[in-house]
Amino acid sequence: APHTADIFYDNTEDMNMFEKIKELLVEELSVNAEDVTPTAELINDLGINSLELADLVLLCEERFDIVIEDEDVQGFVTVGDVVEYLTSKGD
């Protein structure tokens, strides 16, 4: 079967960012790698709680050297939302 992410991301930047976020979720928050897709919802599908979401935000801030505003975090429903946000923050 084709890799799910290929369907969503035809540009390398998003794909790379997706892989980085996936790595954070799997390594830091113990999410199952096969559950992480661009459309997977952080809370409903991946079982992340609000505390873990806050951790993810901090990890992203550190790794990508950016500041993520609280109101922006409320828009993080799916993995893809986080990817799009972080990609837009890049140069």
Image (cartoon, helix red, strand yellow):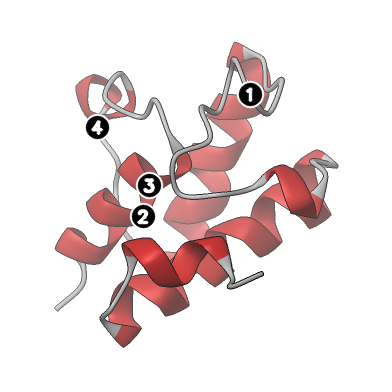
Q: Earlier in the sequence, mark 3 or mark 4?
A: 4
Residue 15 in the image: state x and y as whole percent. Answer: 41, 75
Nearest to the observer: residue 10 or residue 28: 10
Q: CA distance from mark 3 to mark 1?
A: 13 Å
Is residue 65 visible in the rendered image? The answer is no
The residue pinned by badge 3 equals: 80
Q: Which element carries disc 3, helix, strand or loop?
A: helix
Say which amino acid is labelled 1. Asp
Answer few, some or many: residues within 10 Å of disc 1's Cα (few below 14, many 20 plus, some between 14 and 19): some
Say which amino acid is labelled 2. Val
Is residue 57 visible in the rendered image? The answer is yes
Residue contact between numbered discs 4 and 1, judged by CB atoms under 8 Å: no
Q: CA distance from mark 4 to mark 1?
A: 24 Å
Q: Which element carries disc 2, helix, strand or loop?
A: helix
Nearest to the observer: residue 24 or residue 37: 37
The residue pinned by badge 2 equals: 83
Residue 52 in the image: state x and y as whole percent. Answer: 67, 26
Residue 43 in the image: state x and y as whole percent. Answer: 58, 18
Residue contact between numbered discs 3 and 1, judged by CB atoms under 8 Å: no
Say which amino acid is labelled 3. Gly
Residue contact between numbered discs 3 and 4, judged by CB atoms under 8 Å: no
Residue contact between numbered discs 2 and 3, judged by CB atoms under 8 Å: yes
The residue pinned by badge 1 equals: 45
Q: Earlier in the sequence, mark 3 or mark 1?
A: 1
Say which amino acid is labelled 4. Glu
- Which of discs 3 and 4 lies nearer the camera? The answer is 3
